[in-house]
Image (spheres, helix red, strand yellow):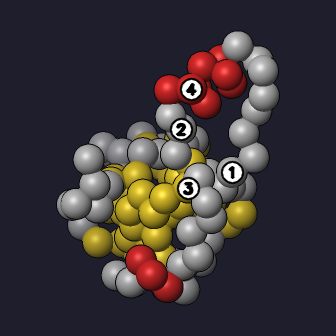
Amino acid sequence: MSDKSDTEIPKGSYAAGERVKIPAGAEPPFTVFINGVEQSEGADYGIEGNEIVFTRPIVKEKIGTGRWLAMYLGLFGTYRKDEKIDLQFSRGGKVELIPDLPVVPYPEAE
């Protein structure tokens, strides 16, 4: 696990966590992507039990009520850093891809 202070967190974003749960029944080989960029096992992440553990925090965008409402109404979009984790794996002999896996929050997060 890395130190959250090692990663630069842009204004309007936060360190969400370093883990995502592997879906039930998923079998290797796993291909992990952050924002569409393939990650390397060992250098970028490892597998611990039923979780993928990254070597750095995953950065997500803070979206308050006002910002969410403005985006919903189409007044403006978002340009803050918001990393998405996608996982490709085998299940029942078929290759599957699950986009935007939820990040397991740090214990002190709400």
Q: Is residue 77 above or below residue 8?
A: above
Q: Secondary structure at mark 4?
A: helix
Residue position for label 3:
13
Apparent side of residue 97 relative to residue 91 in the rendered image (left or right): right
Of the image marks 1 and 3, the number of the one nearer the N terminus: 3
Of the image marks 4 and 1, the number of the one nearer the N terminus: 4
Residue position for label 2:
63
Figure disc tally? 4
Q: Residue furthest toward the front?
A: 66
Amino acid at pointer 2: Ile
- Report crowding for label 3: few under 14, some 14 to 19, many 20 or more residues within 10 A (C-alpha): some
C-alpha span from label 1 to label 3: 7 Å
- Report crowding for label 1: few under 14, some 14 to 19, many 20 or more residues within 10 A (C-alpha): some
Residue 66: assigned label? 4
Q: Is residue 87 above or below residue 48?
A: above
Residue 48 seen by the camera: yes
Residue position for label 1:
80
Q: Which residue does the image show at 49% across and 59% down from the upper left? A: 14
Residue 90: x %, y % from top left: 49, 49
Q: Secondary structure at mark 2?
A: loop
Q: Secondary structure at mark 1?
A: loop
Q: Which residue does the image show at 71% across and 55% down from the upper left? A: 36
- Report crowding for label 4: few under 14, some 14 to 19, many 20 or more residues within 10 A (C-alpha): few
Label 1–label 3 contact, CB within 8 A: yes
Residue 23: x %, y % from top left: 36, 45
Which marked residue is nearer to the observer: mark 2 or mark 4? 4
Q: Secondary structure at mark 3?
A: strand
Of the image marks 2 and 3, the number of the one nearer the N terminus: 3
C-alpha span from label 4 to label 1: 15 Å
Q: Which residue does the image show at 47% across and 45% down from the upper left? A: 101
Label 3–label 4 contact, CB within 8 A: no
